[in-house]
Amino acid sequence: MATASTVDRVSKLSGLRADDFPEEGLLERMPHVRGKLTPNEPLGDHTWFRVGGPAEVLFKPVDEEDLAYFLAHCPIDIPVTVIGLASNLLVRDGGVPGVVIRLGPQFSYIKVEGAMITAGAGALDLNVARAAQASGVAGLEFLCGIPGTIGGGLRMNAGAYGREFKDIVEEVHVLDRSGQRRTLYHDQIGFAYRHTGVPEDNIFIAAVLQGEEGKPDAIQDKMREIQKSRAATQPIREKTGGSTFANPEDDPQKRKSWQLIEAAGCRGLKIGHA
Ligand SMILES: Cc1cc2nc3c(=O)[nH]c(=O)nc-3n(C[C@H](O)[C@H](O)[C@H](O)COP(=O)(O)OP(=O)(O)OC[C@H]3O[C@@H](n4cnc5c(N)ncnc54)[C@H](O)[C@@H]3O)c2cc1C
């Protein structure tokens, strides 16, 4: 269900080979931040598929202020890529040049007020669904089946079982490449099928999600149903991309992605560790 464009974008960014990354060069150009900057960090430890070469530098900001400061002072010629759980990314063995940002615990908060939920972009979709259920907020059950973060879900307009982020997002908070914070309301987000029109260099830091009043037991039942159906149709505990490709909208025979993959003889195709 995810789009290939994400993968393409990272592939393009990853044109360099790991041993092309100089040992020190980039670190010396990094602003002084409170968070952790790690050179040549293997991304395989941070991706759903457990594959991928190193980030030239991995940055884990400690909070929003730290991230904003970093963006404001990181030289503009250095590419910046943000990742969530990386369940929609296939990182090349060549790694990712520039800085890869991973949002940590300070970005994983979930606050419930009535039927409105504010979640940090690092919060897991599953945890947001659970928090909604515990507080009797209905309409967010589909999040329990998506193995990602709120940030990744916003970028992808992720969805399942007839609902997607578009249906629950009231507003989002972003930092742009210069570290400026902005609020974007629903109609400014440009939601489309597994795509959001927010500029690629904007980093989501939080979202305000709207549900509706519901009964915790009924919400729980719906989540169980979703998880049961997933377990029956998709081996979600495997490191598989089987369900992650966006279905083409313009195939004359209206074939689904898996049918095209099979027709191309690519079922089970393996290159390196991918
Ligand atoms: C087994 C399996 C099942 C899946 N099922 C579904 C499904 O039912 N429906 C569905 O829609 N998808 C599905 N996916 C795809 C994937 O889980 C979703 O796209 C998910 O929302 C990705 O979230 P993530 O945090 O892992 O994002 P990542 O994969 O880390 O990143 C995805 C994109 O979002 C960007 N991004 C991540 N965080 C931020 C941020 N804070 N700010 C700005 N950009 C950001 C990244 O740069 C990248 O472009 C599935 C994937 C797997 C492996």
Image: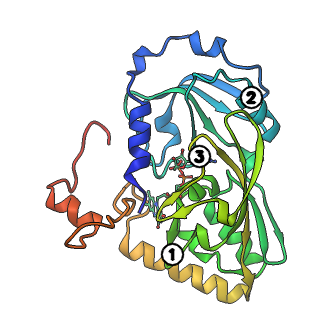
Question: Is label 1 in a helix, a strand or a loop?
Answer: helix
Residue 171's disc number: none
> Is residue 155 in sight in this rendering?
yes
Kindly report the distance in space between the C-alpha atoms of the residues bearing marks 2 and 1.
Answer: 42 Å
Question: At which x and y percent is residue 149?
Answer: 61, 55
Looking at the image, residue 29 lies above or below residue 35: above
Neighbourhood count class around disc 3 (C-alpha, 10 Å): few under 14, some 14–19, many 20 upward: few
Q: Amino acid at mark 1?
A: Gln
Label total for image: 3
Which residue is the site of mark 3?
A: 199
What residue do we see at 27% from left, 36% from top? 272
Q: Earlier in the sequence, mark 2 or mark 1?
A: 2
Do callouts 2 and 3 mark residues in contact (Cβ within 8 Å)? Answer: no
Kindly report the distance in space between the C-alpha atoms of the residues bearing marks 2 and 3.
Answer: 17 Å
What residue do we see at 53% from left, 11% from top? 23
Looking at the image, residue 258 lies above or below residue 8: below
Q: Nearer the viewer, residue 249 or 269?
A: 249
In this rendering, the label closer to the viewer, 3 or 1? 3
Question: Is label 3 in a helix, a strand or a loop?
Answer: loop
Q: Quadrant of the C terminus?
A: top left
Pointer 1 residue Cβ closer than 8 Å to ligand 1: no
Question: Is label 2 in a helix, a strand or a loop?
Answer: helix
Question: At which x and y percent is residue 170?
Answer: 72, 68
Q: Residue 80 appears in which quarter of the rendering?
A: top right
Neighbourhood count class around disc 1 (C-alpha, 10 Å): few under 14, some 14–19, many 20 upward: some
Q: Earlier in the sequence, mark 3 or mark 1?
A: 3
Which residue is the site of mark 1?
A: 227
Which residue is the site of mark 2?
A: 72
